[in-house]
Image: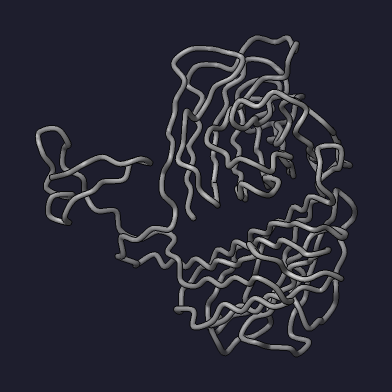
Amino acid sequence: MVEWLAGNRIKGTSTERTAGTPEVPEVPAISGGWKEIGRASVTSGDTINVTSLADKKYLMVLGCGIGSGNVALISRFNSDTGNNYNNRYNSNGGNDVTSGANDRLFTNGAGSSPQEFSVFHVANKSNKEKLLVGHNVNNASTGANNLPQRREYANKWANTSSAISSLNVFNSDSGDFASGSEVVVLGYDPDDTHTTNFWEQLANVTTSSSADFFSSGTITAKKYLWVQAYVKQASPYSTGLQFNSDEANNYAVRFSGNGNSDTTTLTSTWKCAMNYSSLAGGGYFMNAFIINNASNEKLVIAQTSENSSTGAGTAPNRLESAGKWANTSDQITSIQIRKESGAGGGQIQSGSVIKVWGSN
Protein backbone atom coordinates (compact mmCIF):
# COMPACT_ATOMS: atom_id res chain seq x y z
CA MET A 1 0.00 0.00 0.00
CA VAL A 2 1.02 3.63 -0.44
CA GLU A 3 2.12 5.45 2.73
CA TRP A 4 3.08 9.11 3.16
CA LEU A 5 6.39 9.67 4.96
CA ALA A 6 8.09 12.81 6.28
CA GLY A 7 9.08 15.39 3.67
CA ASN A 8 6.25 14.38 1.31
CA ARG A 9 8.02 11.12 0.46
CA ILE A 10 5.96 8.12 -0.56
CA LYS A 11 6.51 4.51 0.47
CA GLY A 12 5.31 1.69 -1.79
CA THR A 13 6.17 -0.16 -4.99
CA SER A 14 6.68 1.85 -8.18
CA THR A 15 3.31 0.62 -9.43
CA GLU A 16 1.56 1.63 -6.19
CA ARG A 17 3.24 5.06 -6.10
CA THR A 18 2.12 6.03 -9.59
CA ALA A 19 -1.30 4.31 -9.70
CA GLY A 20 -2.65 5.98 -6.57
CA THR A 21 -5.35 4.92 -4.11
CA PRO A 22 -8.65 6.44 -2.95
CA GLU A 23 -6.71 8.15 -0.14
CA VAL A 24 -3.73 9.18 -2.28
CA PRO A 25 -4.47 10.36 -5.84
CA GLU A 26 -2.30 9.39 -8.77
CA VAL A 27 1.27 10.61 -8.29
CA PRO A 28 3.14 10.98 -11.58
CA ALA A 29 6.87 10.29 -11.63
CA ILE A 30 8.98 13.45 -11.83
CA SER A 31 11.70 13.11 -14.46
CA GLY A 32 14.98 14.98 -14.58
CA GLY A 33 16.34 17.55 -12.14
CA TRP A 34 19.60 17.77 -10.24
CA LYS A 35 21.07 14.30 -9.71
CA GLU A 36 24.03 13.46 -7.50
CA ILE A 37 26.86 12.28 -9.76
CA GLY A 38 29.74 12.35 -7.30
CA ARG A 39 30.68 12.84 -3.66
CA ALA A 40 33.81 12.64 -1.55
CA SER A 41 34.70 13.45 2.04
CA VAL A 42 37.70 13.33 4.32
CA THR A 43 38.36 12.87 8.02
CA SER A 44 41.76 14.60 7.84
CA GLY A 45 44.23 15.94 5.27
CA ASP A 46 44.28 18.61 2.60
CA THR A 47 42.56 17.11 -0.48
CA ILE A 48 39.07 16.01 -1.51
CA ASN A 49 38.82 14.35 -4.93
CA VAL A 50 35.50 13.64 -6.64
CA THR A 51 36.18 11.36 -9.62
CA SER A 52 34.39 9.48 -12.42
CA LEU A 53 31.81 12.21 -12.96
CA ALA A 54 29.17 11.54 -15.60
CA ASP A 55 29.17 13.94 -18.55
CA LYS A 56 26.45 16.49 -17.73
CA LYS A 57 25.82 19.82 -19.43
CA TYR A 58 25.35 21.66 -16.12
CA LEU A 59 26.94 21.08 -12.70
CA MET A 60 26.06 22.30 -9.22
CA VAL A 61 28.76 21.91 -6.58
CA LEU A 62 28.26 22.04 -2.80
CA GLY A 63 31.49 22.32 -0.82
CA CYS A 64 31.70 22.17 2.98
CA GLY A 65 35.07 22.83 4.57
CA ILE A 66 35.46 22.16 8.30
CA GLY A 67 38.92 22.76 9.62
CA SER A 68 41.40 21.61 12.16
CA GLY A 69 42.75 25.14 11.96
CA ASN A 70 41.86 27.38 9.02
CA VAL A 71 40.72 26.00 5.65
CA ALA A 72 40.15 27.38 2.14
CA LEU A 73 38.33 25.47 -0.63
CA ILE A 74 40.47 25.75 -3.79
CA SER A 75 39.41 23.78 -6.90
CA ARG A 76 40.76 22.25 -10.11
CA PHE A 77 39.12 20.21 -12.86
CA ASN A 78 40.43 16.90 -14.26
CA SER A 79 43.64 17.21 -12.21
CA ASP A 80 44.80 20.02 -14.51
CA THR A 81 47.62 21.87 -12.68
CA GLY A 82 48.56 24.15 -15.60
CA ASN A 83 47.90 27.89 -15.77
CA ASN A 84 44.60 27.24 -17.52
CA TYR A 85 42.26 29.03 -15.12
CA ASN A 86 41.26 32.64 -14.58
CA ASN A 87 39.29 34.17 -11.72
CA ARG A 88 37.32 37.30 -10.90
CA TYR A 89 36.02 37.75 -7.37
CA ASN A 90 34.68 40.26 -4.89
CA SER A 91 35.17 39.93 -1.13
CA ASN A 92 32.93 41.54 1.48
CA GLY A 93 31.67 44.18 -0.91
CA GLY A 94 35.11 45.36 -2.03
CA ASN A 95 36.35 45.97 -5.55
CA ASP A 96 36.68 43.15 -8.06
CA VAL A 97 40.01 41.31 -8.14
CA THR A 98 41.28 39.27 -11.10
CA SER A 99 43.92 36.56 -10.88
CA GLY A 100 45.29 36.43 -14.40
CA ALA A 101 46.22 33.03 -15.82
CA ASN A 102 46.43 30.73 -12.82
CA ASP A 103 46.79 27.08 -11.82
CA ARG A 104 43.60 27.02 -9.70
CA LEU A 105 40.00 28.14 -9.27
CA PHE A 106 39.46 30.52 -6.36
CA THR A 107 36.30 28.95 -4.94
CA ASN A 108 37.41 29.76 -1.39
CA GLY A 109 36.16 32.42 0.98
CA ALA A 110 37.47 35.82 2.02
CA GLY A 111 40.22 35.63 4.65
CA SER A 112 41.02 32.77 7.00
CA SER A 113 38.34 30.73 8.72
CA PRO A 114 37.83 27.31 10.35
CA GLN A 115 34.55 26.72 8.48
CA GLU A 116 33.30 27.65 5.02
CA PHE A 117 30.56 26.76 2.57
CA SER A 118 30.73 27.23 -1.19
CA VAL A 119 28.06 26.78 -3.87
CA PHE A 120 28.86 27.12 -7.56
CA HIS A 121 27.37 26.26 -10.93
CA VAL A 122 29.28 25.31 -14.08
CA ALA A 123 28.38 25.27 -17.77
CA ASN A 124 30.13 22.07 -18.86
CA LYS A 125 30.22 21.74 -22.65
CA SER A 126 33.23 19.77 -23.83
CA ASN A 127 34.18 22.04 -26.77
CA LYS A 128 33.72 25.32 -24.87
CA GLU A 129 35.59 26.97 -22.02
CA LYS A 130 33.97 25.98 -18.73
CA LEU A 131 32.34 29.02 -17.12
CA LEU A 132 31.62 29.04 -13.40
CA VAL A 133 29.65 31.35 -11.09
CA GLY A 134 29.56 30.90 -7.34
CA HIS A 135 29.33 32.19 -3.80
CA ASN A 136 31.18 31.41 -0.59
CA VAL A 137 30.47 32.18 3.06
CA ASN A 138 32.76 31.46 5.99
CA ASN A 139 32.22 31.99 9.70
CA ALA A 140 35.55 33.84 10.33
CA SER A 141 35.44 32.52 13.90
CA THR A 142 32.76 30.97 16.07
CA GLY A 143 30.12 33.05 17.83
CA ALA A 144 27.51 35.61 16.75
CA ASN A 145 29.93 38.39 17.77
CA ASN A 146 32.13 37.43 14.79
CA LEU A 147 30.97 38.47 11.34
CA PRO A 148 30.76 35.93 8.54
CA GLN A 149 32.71 36.76 5.39
CA ARG A 150 31.38 36.48 1.85
CA ARG A 151 32.79 36.16 -1.64
CA GLU A 152 31.15 36.14 -5.07
CA TYR A 153 33.18 34.77 -7.95
CA ALA A 154 33.09 34.19 -11.71
CA ASN A 155 35.80 31.83 -12.94
CA LYS A 156 36.71 29.79 -16.00
CA TRP A 157 38.70 26.76 -17.05
CA ALA A 158 40.08 27.44 -20.53
CA ASN A 159 39.85 23.79 -21.67
CA THR A 160 37.94 23.32 -24.95
CA SER A 161 38.53 19.61 -25.54
CA SER A 162 37.10 17.74 -22.55
CA ALA A 163 34.04 17.71 -20.32
CA ILE A 164 34.66 17.85 -16.58
CA SER A 165 35.16 14.31 -15.26
CA SER A 166 36.71 15.06 -11.87
CA LEU A 167 36.79 17.84 -9.30
CA ASN A 168 39.90 18.21 -7.18
CA VAL A 169 39.46 20.36 -4.06
CA PHE A 170 42.41 21.18 -1.83
CA ASN A 171 43.05 23.32 1.21
CA SER A 172 45.36 26.29 0.67
CA ASP A 173 45.26 27.57 4.26
CA SER A 174 47.31 26.65 7.32
CA GLY A 175 45.05 23.97 8.82
CA ASP A 176 43.72 20.62 7.62
CA PHE A 177 40.30 19.43 6.54
CA ALA A 178 38.59 17.75 9.49
CA SER A 179 35.77 15.24 9.72
CA GLY A 180 32.63 16.55 8.04
CA SER A 181 34.46 18.22 5.15
CA GLU A 182 32.74 17.16 1.95
CA VAL A 183 32.19 18.00 -1.72
CA VAL A 184 29.01 16.96 -3.54
CA VAL A 185 28.64 17.31 -7.33
CA LEU A 186 25.19 17.39 -8.96
CA GLY A 187 24.56 17.10 -12.69
CA TYR A 188 21.71 18.18 -14.94
CA ASP A 189 20.84 17.68 -18.61
CA PRO A 190 17.57 18.94 -20.13
CA ASP A 191 16.89 15.50 -21.62
CA ASP A 192 17.42 13.58 -18.35
CA THR A 193 14.67 11.05 -17.53
CA HIS A 194 15.84 9.81 -14.11
CA THR A 195 13.60 10.09 -11.03
CA THR A 196 16.37 10.36 -8.43
CA ASN A 197 16.40 14.10 -7.79
CA PHE A 198 18.93 15.13 -5.14
CA TRP A 199 16.66 17.88 -3.78
CA GLU A 200 13.60 16.72 -1.83
CA GLN A 201 10.84 19.24 -1.20
CA LEU A 202 10.42 19.75 2.55
CA ALA A 203 8.02 22.69 2.72
CA ASN A 204 5.75 24.73 0.47
CA VAL A 205 3.80 27.37 2.40
CA THR A 206 1.67 30.25 1.10
CA THR A 207 0.32 32.68 3.68
CA SER A 208 -3.41 33.35 3.82
CA SER A 209 -3.31 36.39 6.11
CA SER A 210 -0.99 39.27 7.02
CA ALA A 211 1.42 38.89 9.95
CA ASP A 212 4.77 40.04 11.33
CA PHE A 213 6.32 36.67 10.40
CA PHE A 214 5.54 33.40 8.70
CA SER A 215 7.12 29.96 8.90
CA SER A 216 7.94 26.90 6.86
CA GLY A 217 6.49 24.78 9.65
CA THR A 218 8.47 21.77 10.87
CA ILE A 219 10.77 20.30 8.22
CA THR A 220 12.87 17.16 8.14
CA ALA A 221 16.45 17.95 9.18
CA LYS A 222 18.81 17.78 6.18
CA LYS A 223 22.51 18.61 5.79
CA TYR A 224 21.96 20.86 2.76
CA LEU A 225 19.01 23.24 2.45
CA TRP A 226 17.83 25.29 -0.53
CA VAL A 227 15.30 28.01 0.28
CA GLN A 228 13.27 30.20 -2.05
CA ALA A 229 10.81 32.83 -0.85
CA TYR A 230 8.57 35.48 -2.33
CA VAL A 231 7.62 38.06 0.29
CA LYS A 232 4.88 40.61 -0.35
CA GLN A 233 5.22 43.98 1.35
CA ALA A 234 2.99 47.04 1.22
CA SER A 235 5.70 49.48 2.41
CA PRO A 236 9.42 49.59 3.26
CA TYR A 237 10.79 47.57 6.18
CA SER A 238 13.50 44.98 6.69
CA THR A 239 12.87 41.27 7.04
CA GLY A 240 15.29 38.49 7.91
CA LEU A 241 15.59 34.77 8.54
CA GLN A 242 15.24 33.01 11.86
CA PHE A 243 15.72 29.31 12.54
CA ASN A 244 13.82 27.04 14.93
CA SER A 245 12.04 30.17 16.29
CA ASP A 246 15.27 31.13 18.07
CA GLU A 247 14.90 34.78 19.13
CA ALA A 248 18.14 35.02 21.12
CA ASN A 249 21.18 37.03 19.98
CA ASN A 250 22.58 34.15 17.93
CA TYR A 251 22.74 35.59 14.40
CA ALA A 252 25.24 37.65 12.44
CA VAL A 253 25.01 38.94 8.87
CA ARG A 254 26.73 41.08 6.28
CA PHE A 255 24.98 42.26 3.14
CA SER A 256 25.37 44.63 0.22
CA GLY A 257 22.55 46.42 -1.59
CA ASN A 258 22.99 47.44 -5.24
CA GLY A 259 26.77 47.06 -5.11
CA ASN A 260 27.27 49.40 -2.14
CA SER A 261 29.62 48.75 0.78
CA ASP A 262 28.60 45.97 3.14
CA THR A 263 26.28 46.62 6.05
CA THR A 264 26.97 44.37 9.04
CA THR A 265 25.03 43.28 12.13
CA LEU A 266 26.35 41.24 15.07
CA THR A 267 24.49 39.33 17.82
CA SER A 268 21.11 39.87 16.22
CA THR A 269 17.85 38.21 17.26
CA TRP A 270 16.61 37.73 13.70
CA LYS A 271 19.01 38.85 10.95
CA CYS A 272 20.57 35.95 9.06
CA ALA A 273 19.74 36.92 5.47
CA MET A 274 18.21 40.23 4.55
CA ASN A 275 16.06 42.18 2.17
CA TYR A 276 16.73 45.79 1.18
CA SER A 277 14.67 47.98 3.54
CA SER A 278 14.27 50.86 1.06
CA LEU A 279 11.68 48.80 -0.78
CA ALA A 280 9.00 51.15 -2.10
CA GLY A 281 6.24 48.60 -2.60
CA GLY A 282 5.62 45.23 -4.17
CA GLY A 283 7.74 42.34 -2.93
CA TYR A 284 11.02 40.52 -3.14
CA PHE A 285 12.32 37.12 -4.24
CA MET A 286 15.10 35.43 -2.28
CA ASN A 287 17.22 32.39 -3.19
CA ALA A 288 19.38 30.90 -0.42
CA PHE A 289 21.58 27.89 0.36
CA ILE A 290 22.37 26.71 3.90
CA ILE A 291 24.85 24.21 5.32
CA ASN A 292 23.04 22.57 8.22
CA ASN A 293 25.35 20.40 10.35
CA ALA A 294 24.17 20.08 13.96
CA SER A 295 27.64 20.49 15.53
CA ASN A 296 28.73 23.48 13.40
CA GLU A 297 27.46 27.00 12.89
CA LYS A 298 24.82 27.18 10.18
CA LEU A 299 26.12 29.25 7.23
CA VAL A 300 23.79 30.99 4.78
CA ILE A 301 24.35 32.33 1.25
CA ALA A 302 21.47 34.41 -0.15
CA GLN A 303 20.66 36.61 -3.14
CA THR A 304 17.59 38.83 -3.36
CA SER A 305 15.83 40.73 -6.15
CA GLU A 306 13.32 43.35 -5.04
CA ASN A 307 10.63 45.24 -6.85
CA SER A 308 11.55 48.78 -5.79
CA SER A 309 8.62 50.19 -7.77
CA THR A 310 6.16 48.87 -10.32
CA GLY A 311 6.70 49.41 -14.05
CA ALA A 312 9.62 48.97 -16.44
CA GLY A 313 10.92 52.46 -15.72
CA THR A 314 12.45 51.48 -12.36
CA ALA A 315 15.19 48.87 -11.95
CA PRO A 316 14.84 46.30 -9.17
CA ASN A 317 17.13 46.32 -6.16
CA ARG A 318 19.63 43.51 -5.73
CA LEU A 319 21.19 42.27 -2.53
CA GLU A 320 23.81 39.68 -1.56
CA SER A 321 23.82 38.34 2.00
CA ALA A 322 26.08 36.07 4.02
CA GLY A 323 24.81 35.06 7.43
CA LYS A 324 25.23 32.58 10.20
CA TRP A 325 23.25 31.08 13.05
CA ALA A 326 25.78 30.46 15.83
CA ASN A 327 23.98 27.39 17.19
CA THR A 328 26.31 24.36 17.37
CA SER A 329 23.97 21.75 18.86
CA ASP A 330 20.87 21.59 16.61
CA GLN A 331 19.98 21.22 12.96
CA ILE A 332 17.49 23.62 11.41
CA THR A 333 14.00 22.11 11.52
CA SER A 334 11.95 25.25 10.81
CA ILE A 335 12.59 28.54 9.03
CA GLN A 336 10.88 31.85 9.83
CA ILE A 337 10.81 35.02 7.73
CA ARG A 338 10.34 37.83 10.23
CA LYS A 339 9.73 41.55 10.02
CA GLU A 340 12.16 43.76 11.92
CA SER A 341 10.93 44.16 15.49
CA GLY A 342 9.32 47.56 16.08
CA ALA A 343 9.39 48.56 12.41
CA GLY A 344 6.39 50.41 11.04
CA GLY A 345 4.85 50.04 7.62
CA GLY A 346 2.36 47.27 8.16
CA GLN A 347 2.81 43.52 8.05
CA ILE A 348 4.08 40.86 5.67
CA GLN A 349 1.20 40.43 3.24
CA SER A 350 -0.93 37.38 2.51
CA GLY A 351 0.18 35.47 -0.57
CA SER A 352 3.81 35.37 0.59
CA VAL A 353 5.51 32.04 -0.14
CA ILE A 354 8.38 29.99 1.27
CA LYS A 355 9.64 26.76 -0.32
CA VAL A 356 12.35 24.58 1.16
CA TRP A 357 14.25 21.68 -0.40
CA GLY A 358 16.83 19.56 1.36
CA SER A 359 19.19 16.62 1.08
CA ASN A 360 21.83 14.79 3.04
Q: Who's the residue at 75% across and 34% down the image?
A: 251
Q: Who's the residue at 85% across and 33% down the image?
A: 266
Left/right placement of residue 140 relative to residue 233 reads right
Q: Is residue 180 above or below residue 285?
A: below
Residue closer to the observer: 240 or 183: 183
Q: Where the N terminus falls, by quadrant?
A: top left
Residue closer to the observer: 326 or 228: 326
Q: Is residue 125 above or below residue 304?
A: below
Residue closer to the observer: 95 or 142: 142
Return the x and y of residue 158 as percentages of the image width and height. Answer: 68, 82
Return the x and y of residue 271 as percentages of the image width and height. Answer: 73, 30
Q: Who's the residue at 65% across and 38% down the image?
A: 305
Residue closer to the observer: 237 or 144: 144
Q: Who's the residue at 68% across and 75% down the image?
A: 169
Left/right placement of residue 317 relative to residue 194 reads right
- Identify the coloring: one colour
Residue 62, located in which quarter of the rendered image?
bottom right
Left/right placement of residue 325 relative to residue 54 reads right
Q: Is residue 171 above or below residue 102?
A: above
Question: How many numbered marks appear?
Answer: 0
Return the x and y of residue 90 as percentages of the image width and height. Answer: 83, 57
Return the x and y of residue 42 as percentages of the image width and height. Answer: 63, 72
